[in-house]
Image (cartoon, rainbow, N blue to C red):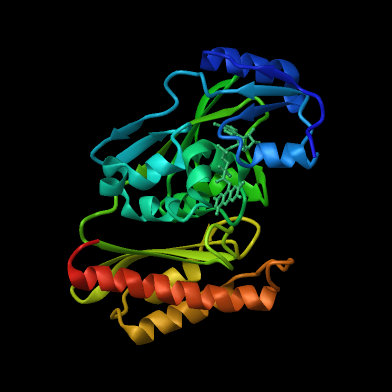
Amino acid sequence: MKPAAFAYCAPRTLEEAISLLDEHGYDAKLLAGGQSLVPLMNLRLARPTVLVDINRVDGLAFVESGDEVVRIGAMTRHHTVATSSEIRGASPLLSHAAGHIGYRAIRHRGTLGGSLAHADPASELPCVAVTQSATVRVTGSAGERTIRADELFLAEMTTTLAPDEIVTSVAIPRIRPDEGWGFREFVRKVGDFAVVMAAALLRVADGRVASARLGLGGAEGTPRRVTEAEQALVGSVLGAETIEKAARVAAEAVEPTSDIHGSADYRRRLVHAMTRRALQDALGRLEAGHG
Ligand SMILES: Cc1cc2nc3c(=O)[nH]c(=O)nc-3n(C[C@H](O)[C@H](O)[C@H](O)COP(=O)(O)OP(=O)(O)OC[C@H]3O[C@@H](n4cnc5c(N)ncnc54)[C@H](O)[C@@H]3O)c2cc1C
C-alpha cells in the first residue's frame, strides 16, 4: 500500500522543526529513521498531513562521554549505539541490547530518539533506558525539559511528549566497573521484535547483593522496573536459589498483555525464563570480574 498524501518539510534547524510542529499540531509528524513511521503510513495506520524530516538538522547525532553519564544525540542510529566504543565503555548493556534490534538495515536507519518516541513496548532501547534510569532531554515551543525515562512511557505507543516536542538527547548513567549486567530476550526468529525481554544490573558487596536493577520489556504495555524482584535480590547471597526466587517474584509481579504473539500466561513464563537468564548472565560477569 501507499501512504495517504502528505506535505514534506526538511528543516535545517531545531527551531524551524519546532515551529513547523507548533504550526501543524497533531497533523504533523517528525520523520527520523522512518523504520516505524513509514510502515505505519504505508498501512494507513498513521496519516500525517505534514512530515517534518529532521535528518538534516545539525547537532542531533553525537556521543558525548562524561564522568557520570554518556549523552547520546536523538538522531544517533541504532548501529552506532551498538558499535560505538564510547557507548560500550559507558553502558555495555545498552550496546548489547541495541545489537538485538531488527536487522542490519533497520539498525543503520533507526534512531535512539525515534525508538523512545515511538514507545513500542517490545523495543530494546526503552527497556534499557528505564532499567538504567536514563533521562531524556526534549525541546518544544515552551522550551527545554528533562524527563525521566520511566515517566516518558504512558501506555503502548503513547508517551508524555507534547505534539511540538522533539527528543534531542538521552543521558545514560555509566555502569560501574563493579556492576554485572545481563540482557536476554525471546524472539520467534532472528530480527523479529522480542516477545519479552529482561535487563539486569547487579552490584555485590561483602558477598551480598548491594544493588539490583531489573527491567522488563514486552511483558506489559510499557517497559518497567520490577522493584518487587529487585527487593528480593538486595541483601541476599547471589546464587542459583536467589536468582530463581527473583525470577519467580518477577513473573508474579507482572500483569502481562495478551496478543497474537503470545498469551498472558505464555508471557508470564517468558518473564520468568528471561529474568533468570539475565540475572545468571549478570552473576557470570561479576564472577568473571568484568561488568
Ligand atoms: C522489520 C522491522 C523490524 C524491527 N525490529 C525492531 C526490534 O526488534 N526492536 C526495536 O526496538 N525496533 C524494531 N524496529 C523499529 C526500529 O527500531 C525503529 O527504528 C524505531 O522504532 C523508530 O525509530 P526511527 O528513527 O525509525 O523513527 P521513525 O519511524 O522515524 O519515527 C517513529 C515515531 O517517533 C517519532 N519521532 C522520531 N524521532 C523523534 C524525536 N527525536 N523526537 C520526538 N519524536 C520523534 C516520529 O514522529 C514517529 O511518531 C523494527 C522495524 C522494522 C521495519
Give the residue drawn at x 72%, y 15%.
Answer: 23
Q: Is residue 64 left or right of residue 149?
A: left
Q: Nearer the viewer, residue 91 or 55?
A: 55
Residue 101 against residue 219 in the figure, above or below: above
Q: Is residue 100 left or right of residue 62?
A: right
Give the residue drawn at x 36%, y 35%.
Answer: 71
Give the quarter of the image for residue 195. bottom right
Give the residue drawn at x 62%, y 73%.
Answer: 267
Give x and y (percent) for residue 230.
42, 69
Residue 3 against residue 5 in the figure, above or below: below
Which quarter is ligand 1 in?
Answer: top right
Give the residue drawn at x 43%, y 83%.
Answer: 244
Image quarter (top left, top right, bottom left or bottom right) of the C terminus? bottom left
Q: Nearer the viewer, residue 156 or 48?
A: 48
Residue 153 against residue 180 in the figure, above or below: above
Give the quarter of the image for residue 96. bottom left
Give x and y (percent) for residue 214.
44, 64
Q: Residue furthest bottom?
A: 241
The answer to whether residue 76 shows anywhere in this view is yes
Give the quarter of the image for residue 213. bottom left
Give x and y (percent) for residue 84.
31, 41
Looking at the rendered structure, the number of numbered marks drawn on it comes to 0
The answer to whether residue 204 shows anywhere in this view is no
Q: Is residue 194 left or right of residue 107?
A: right
Give x and y (percent) for residue 147.
51, 38
Q: Nearer the viewer, residue 165 or 50?
A: 50
Image quarter (top left, top right, bottom left or bottom right) of the N terminus? top right
Residue 217 against residue 57 in the figure, above or below: below
